[in-house]
Image (spheres, rainbow, N blue to C red):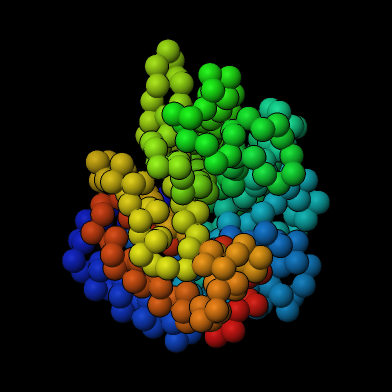
Amino acid sequence: MHDSALGTDRPSRRAVLRAALGLAATGAVPAAAEDSSNVRAMWVWDTDTLMASESDREAFLDAAGRLRLTEAFLYLRADDYTARDRRLAALLAALARLDVRAWGMEGWRGYFSDVDGPVGLYAAADAMIAYNGRHRRGFAGFHSDLEPQDGQGVGDNRFTNGVAESQLSPMQLSARDGLLAEWLGIHAALRAKTAAAGLDYGAALPDWVDNYEGEPVTVGWQGGRHSLLRRLLGVVPQYVVMSYNTNPTKVVERVRGELRAADAGGVPRIVFGLETHAGAGVNVSYADTPGKRHRARVMADIEKIATAITDHPSYLGWAIHDWQGWQTLPP
């Protein structure tokens, strides 16, 4: 996390943020209008393309410069850090020239124990750390994108989607508890790995962690029941909420619980996310929603959301999912 994120000048931060985002909607953010404490991030799932194609890489770098991105979450498998070492080094060097911090990123439902387990996920983090040991210019941290609910065509029905906690049978509750406890353990292991290497750790988290089907979410832990959100906040320093919705009011509602829970710490750490990838659904993705299919609309909504929540001490910034979606949206 940036040291400058510890600043507490909230009124000036709001004014500067409004100016910066307004200018971003037109295509560029002058350096004088930036708020250096704010994270501006983008997920990149097709990192292979950026390493293989100069034109694709330049297109991404141009977008990163216009948006004044501070972070790029780059999807990389464990073997990419060695098999594509030189190309990766060139990409990181180009990002560094724009003051964009590169994060290694991995995630899949299959990294839970009912499928393949987290070995591959841990291997990616270890490979990123080893890459840093070989290069003067390395990664700033590791970002996981790991959701426990059923989906992606793998895994047992251990979460029981669509059912509030109070409506679960004892067997279903035990299965969900086991899955959520495993999730916490994976985050704790990844944070320990990155902390030992002097690197940051962050994660993309679903927006239901504080409220699922109208009820708080708890997890059986050390003989009692505890807030899942508070447990996650204890192990995930940069907490990126997948608050995907094209209605700014809905996004604010989705991140308010995380902000309030994190505010007591007084450190900016909560990032809200917007979806631009086609196929997620109407009112979920800007690419799928009539009247919202423009980059300028995304940036205008970011301004509205940020203005509504910037007085929360724990607010850190925003993230766009993802590069492939963003580049296909018209201006």
Counting labels gives 0
Quadrant into which the C terminus falls:
bottom right
- State the residue in front, 265 or 133: 265
Q: Eyeballing the image, is 303 above or below 184?
A: below
Q: Eyeballing the image, is 165 above or below 132?
A: above
User: Which residue is drawn at the image coordinates 62% and 50% (left, top)?
Assistant: 105
- State the residue in front, 238 or 97: 238
Task: Looking at this view, name the residue that lies furthest to the top.
Answer: 223
Q: Eyeballing the image, is 327 above or below 180?
A: below
- The answer to whether residue 200 is visible is no
- State the residue in front, 185 or 39: 185
Rendering coords of residue 186 (x, y %): 57, 31
Rendering coords of residue 238 (x, y %): 44, 47
Rendering coords of residue 276 (x, y %): 57, 69
Q: Residue 311 falls in which quadrant of the image? A: bottom left
Q: Eyeballing the image, is 243 above or below 150?
A: below
Q: Quick check: 267 left or right of 83?
A: left
- The answer to whether residue 58 is visible is yes
Q: Quick check: 104 left or right of 123?
A: left
Rendering coords of residue 261 (x, y %): 31, 41
Task: Looking at this view, name the residue that lies furthest to the right.
Answer: 83
User: Which residue is drawn at the image coordinates 36% and 72% (left, top)?
Assistant: 303
User: Which residue is drawn at the image coordinates 79% and 67% (left, top)?
Assistant: 52
User: Which residue is drawn at the image coordinates 39% and 38% (left, top)?
Assistant: 215
